Every structure is written in structure tokens, then in C-alpha cells.
Image (cartoon, coloured by chain):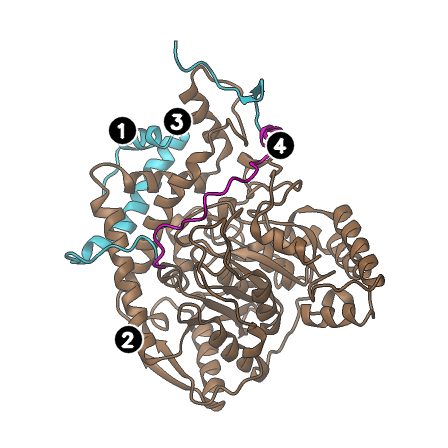
Chain colours: A brown, B cyan
Amino acid sequence: MLYQKSVSALQHMLQNKEVTSEEVTQSYLDRIEMVDKKVGAYITVASESALATARAVDEKRNKGEVLSPFAGIPIGIKDNMCTEGLRTTCASKMLDNFVPPFDATIINKIKENDMIILGKLNMDEFAMGSSTENSAYHVTKNPWDLEYVPGGSSGGSAAAVAAELAPFTLGSDTGGSIRQPAHYCGVVGMKPTYGRVSRYGLIAFASSLDQIGPLTRDVRDAALALNLICGHDRMDSSSAFMDTPDFTTYLDQDIKGMRIALPREFMGEGIAEDVKASILSAVKILEHMGAVVDEVHMEMTEYALPSYYLISSAEASSNLARFDGIKYGHQAGDYDTLVELYKQSRDEGFGAEVKRRIMLGTYALSSGYYDAYYKKAQQVRTLIKNQFDLLFAEYDLVLTPTGPTTAFKIGAKVNNPIEMYLNDICTVPINIAGLPAISLNSGFDRMGLPIGLQLIGKGFDEGTILKVAHAYEQARVLDKVRPEL
Amino acid sequence: MKITREEVEHVAHLARLNLTEDEKIQMTKDMEAIIGFADQINALEIGDVIPTAHVIPINNVFRDDVARPSMDREKLLRNAPNQENGCFSVPKVVE
């Protein structure tokens, strides 16, 4: 079936005119029609514009125009990236009727490459959450077991790839929001180095941590996706002045002599036995291929999570101040004064978790608490960054599980914010230090749920991550390739 | 870390959130738990470590001072709940 093909396979077939973009797009739309009732990955499916764009690309190709290698390839987009003329909700009632007047830089790139946008994917409201249960619309289900969560916040993006509702998708990662759902759904999720991908038009959650990245079926597709999305953008002042290499040149390489650190702190208490066992079997495979894996000690890890929640909530409370019910978004019907209009619109528009984060962030920034919380969290940030610098002076990569456990049941943690936050324990340190990291499937637990392995690299060294991830992917043996739906 | 209802009301006001009665009760409990959790970092003696606000060393980013067209006014107003004479409309602020 066409919808089962990887991006690299589809590129080949389209370029050789074995299929048309319309056929590929229709195959995905039919699949969405049939399967997404069960999974709930999409908030908005853009069937008409997708088919119209596909036909236009086919016409260009038939005329013999020189096209991008991505021309005619469909993609799904997390619903926090602005798409001109296509509703962008951030999975919030606040933006229920928001139709952006502009395209995010990343969407511009997708359009310039003649790609097909299939639709907008479900997420935790404003990307705050680890299960996609905080969506104001519906709960996305894990394609491997529909009673389980797909992870979050890019749960729709991960579930869509696992359920073959898109060949690949884009997500955003503030504290693990690409990698953790990739881990829960058994797909490849990559967070590039902070500054690699433009954030212009990505609805901001925590600006010093947010980064866009791809969710794909395999590592080759992740490399292709990075070629597409990376690059400096003058519209984003935190965008790095770095050249984008051809990331596919890092694939099919020998990993002999690669030095990999395995910090004990991410393999100890609180990490499920099945997860540990899977990571250790991956270590054996890597060693067998000639990599040198050393157990190491990494300090400060226990302070990463509280520090992350303080920094990200503080930045969120500031970023989300723009939702005032005046320029766009929900406006309350009943108010007397301007301040009442703000307060009532925000109370009605935001969900419970978003309000909790705004409250925590406002508290941490408020007079009398700033030094004890926000400033202290930023000092911890320095120490965590230093810990990674120490490791990277000796090692090429750091290896950890992507999360302490596999997916949990829908509803299991919804009433306990702290327990929900603990799911991010292996992923937040990477955002704090601004580093690149990938999650890919290393096997399944006893319930048949996927387990994710995380490889962390030096800043702007996505290439080494892809090299080792690809070598491991070729060598690993999985009992299952796709969920039954 | 004890969080009082008054503190919740104060912070909600700073954050421009009208909380309902039920929300205030729940938020007081949640804030207490979350701030207690965040307080773990205060177990760390940290001295005068320099805080990191941003991981990449970019300061000011300048571009040439060249005029470019702005976004279309009508297009920008299209998402506004209330508009009048090409402007966003708000309740009276100054008597």
C-alpha cells in the first residue's frame, strides 16, 4: 500500500513517475478516513487543498519542470504552526476560530518545496503536557493499543506516523514533546539543536527551549526531514548562523570506535525493568558494531526537572500574555472593563493545565520569589549545561532511555500533575542544554508497547546522532513493524 | 510550602485570570504541590553561578534598515472579535 511507504521510497517513486502525488495523497486521505476515527491524530484534515496541490504538482512534473526532491510528498503538521488560511488551534478553545494571516517559516519551506499538507495534528493544549489528554478537542489514542496514550505534547504527530496517516510529520519539542511521543508510538523523533530550525510562526510556549523537529518511520527519513527544515531565518532572532549539511551523508557509516556515555542516573530507580533491559540490549548491539560504551556518572540530573518546569512556565506565562481576547482568539461575552475582558476571556479560553503553568510561571517571576525560583532555575541550567560539556569532552554521544516507562493508560495520570511531569525526566535536560537528540524504537515491553532509546549529541552535531542511530536501526531486530488497526 | 487562597487570588490577578470558586480551591492545592516540587532546587547550595537565559551566544541581531511592506491591515483584522474603522475595538479605558 502507498501509505506504508517511507519518505525516501515515495521520493523515488514520484521522481520515476511510478506514482502521482494525487495517488499518494489520496491513499493517505483514504487511510485517514478509515483509521483516524479510532486514533484521533488529526484536528483538521485539509482534503480539498491537499488534493488540489497534489494535482498541481503532478502537472508541473508532467510538464518536465525541475522539482524539489520533496515535491508531491504529503506531510502532517502539529497544530501549533501557523498555516495561512488553514485553522491553527494549538488544541485550545482560545484559538478555536483562529485562521492565521501568514505562514510560519517552516510552512513556507514546505510550500516552496511543493509538498502536500494533509492537515493539522492534535497535541496537548499549547504543547503543555505529556499525553495529548490536554487537548481541548479529543484524546489521541496510541496506535499500538487504543487504551493507552500516545505521549505528548506532539501525540497527534507521533500517532499519525505510527498509524500511517502521514509519511512523516512535524512536531515541536520544549521538554521532550517530540521524543517522548516517538518513544510511546515506536517511531523516530528528532529534536535538532536549539537554533537549527526557525521558530517564526511556531506558537510560542517557552522560547528559550522550543524547537521544531520531525517524526518519521525511520532514521533515513529523519535525515531527509532535517535537510528540509534546517537553516538560518532572519525572521527568528534566535536562529543560528549555521550551514545545513546534507544529513543523509551521515547514513550507512561505520561506527567503530565511537565513544558513547551511558549515565547511571538515567538507568536507576524509577526506570521500568523492561525499559532498562531494552536499552542494555541496544548497548550490546552498539558494542558489537565497534562502539565503546562506558557507564558514567552525571551530576545535577535530579534538579533538571524542577528547573525545567520553573523556566518553561515562567516563559509561558510571559508568551501567553498575548492572548487577551482582543486581537484574535476567544473573547468573553460578558465584561464591564478592559481588565475584566482580559481576565474573563483567558479564564474561558484556557484549559486547566495551561492555567496551572501560567500561575506557576507568574508566581516564579513575581516579586519576592524571583531569586528563589526563576533565577535559581537558570543557575541550575548553567550547571546542567556544564555537565554535558564535561561528558562531551570525552564522548561523541550520550545514550539514555527516552522515558522512564512505556505508555500509560488514558486517564491514569490526568489528576496528578506531578506524576505527569515525571514522564519528562529523561528528556528535559537536553532542552535545558539546547542539545540535539533522537528517539528511536529499541523494542517492546511485556505489554507489547514500544520502548524508545535516546541518543544525545553535541550542539549542531546532529550528523553523529544520525550516523549511530542509523547503524543501530539496521542492526536491531524488532518483533513487530506496524500496529494492527 | 503553604500556598494560601489569597496568594492564588493575587497571582491570578497578576496573570489576568478570572478563576471560578471551584478553580480557586483546586488551584490552591495544585500550586502547593507543584511549588513544593519546584522547591527541590532550593536544596542545592549554588553560590554565584552565572544564570543561563539562553544556550546559544547570540546577542543583538541587526539587519539593514530597509523598508519592506507590512502585513495587510484588513488581513490582520480578520481574526479580531471586534473591530471598528480599521482598528481593534476595546471597552472604554479612559473616562
State the residue lying farthest toward the top: B95
Q: Do the residues labelled 2 and 4 touch (CB within 8 Å)?
A: no
- Amino acid at pointer 1: Glu
* Residue stretch rendered in magenta on the structure: B55-79
Disc on the earlier residue, 3 or 4: 3
- Pinpoint residue A301: horizontal percent, then vertical percent: 30, 65
Q: Is mark 1 on a helix, strand or loop?
A: helix
Disc on the earlier residue, 1 or 3: 1
Tags 3 and 2 both on a single chain = no
Q: How crowded is mark 2: few (under 14 residues within 10 Å), some or many (20 or more)?
A: some
Tags 2 and 4 both on a single chain = no
Q: Residue A297 carries which label?
A: 2
Q: Which mark is residue A163?
A: none
The residue that label 4 is drawn on is B75
| Residue drawn at x 81%, y 59% as measured from the top left | A58
- Pinpoint residue B53: horizontal percent, then vertical percent: 31, 52
Main SS of the magenta part reads: loop
Q: Which of label 1 and label 3 is nearer to you?
A: 1
Q: What element carries label 2?
A: loop
Task: Please say whether residue A250 is one of the residues in the magenta stretch.
Answer: no
The residues tagged by marks 3 and 2 sit, at their Cα atoms, a distance apart of 48 Å
The residue that label 3 is drawn on is B21
Q: How crowded is mark 3: few (under 14 residues within 10 Å), some or many (20 or more)?
A: few
Tags 2 and 1 both on a single chain = no
| Residue drawn at x 19%, y 58% as measured from the top left | B49
- Subunit of mark 3? B
- Pinpoint residue A245: horizontal percent, then vertical percent: 53, 71
Query: Is residue A417 depicted above or below A331 in this figure?
Result: below
